Image (spheres, helix red, strand yellow):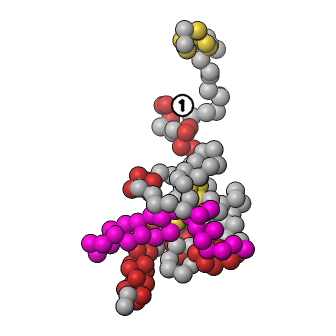
Amino acid sequence: MTDPKPVQRLKIFGREQPASRPAEDAPGPESGDNPYWSAEEPDEHPDPSLGCIRRGLCCKSSPGWYGPGELEQSAQALGMQPDEFVRKFLVIDGIEFEEKRVEVFAPVKLDRFGKPAWQPGTRVDALYRTLRGVCVFYDGHGCKIYQARPIECARYLCTQPAEQNMSHLEVAALWAGAAESDAP
């Protein structure tokens, strides 16, 4: 039998506090596992041939972008007018495509408190795209607008290689093509 390790004391704002001890089965630094990442690691897909089984892995990290004409369907699914829908649930993101800035609509990301990470209905900056955040339409069990979700979400499949999923550039190409067809 080994002697128990002495309790370490931490000084927090001038007071000493006993350090918390990890659970017996918690991974330690020697195991190579980071306990903060374990909550983010997805469980294995039970059957990749099933396709999307609505685990929400993509919904919890970065919402997909809308293609032209799609947000109207999502607004209708929620019984809203498109303008109200944009001002409540979407942000305007953008990307450089063929030497032009192309703007797109995307669901707002929620912060760790469940609040919008950016003001809905406004343009976001480049940093916003790099932030992880749960999609405003993910309710913990799946997408609230699954039948009218953005094209990038509809074409995304977590079991296929990333290069087979639709990219932001491909969505931007749709918007650029729509803008050209609308030009006089």
- On the rendered structure, is 167 left or right of 71? left
As drawn, 36 above or below 5: below
Residue drawn at (50%, 35%) of the image: 31
The number of callouts visible is 1
Residue 104 within the segment the image draws in magenta: yes
Measured as percent of width and height from the top left, residue 133 is found at 55, 53
Nearer-the-camera pick, 164 or 44: 164
Measured as percent of width and height from the top left, residue 71 is found at 58, 75
Measured as percent of width and height from the top left, residue 10 is found at 55, 13
Q: Give the quarter of the image for residue 120.
A: bottom right
- On the rendered structure, is 11 left or right of 172? right
- On the rendered structure, is 101 left or right of 151? left
As drawn, 179 above or below 107: below
Question: Mark 1 falls on what kind of element?
Answer: loop
Q: Amino acid at mark 1?
A: Gly
Nearer-the-camera pick, 65 or 124: 124
Measured as percent of width and height from the top left, residue 36 is found at 55, 39
Residue drawn at (44%, 75%) of the image: 171
Residue 133 in sight:
no
Nearer-the-camera pick, 2 or 103: 103
Q: Which residue is mark 1?
A: 28
Residue 37 within the segment the image draws in magenta: no
Residue drawn at (47%, 37%) of the image: 32
Crowdedness near tag 1: few (<14), some (14–19) or many (≥20) residues, C-alpha within 10 Å = few
- The span shown in magenta is 79-105
Q: Give the quarter of the image for residue 35.
A: top right
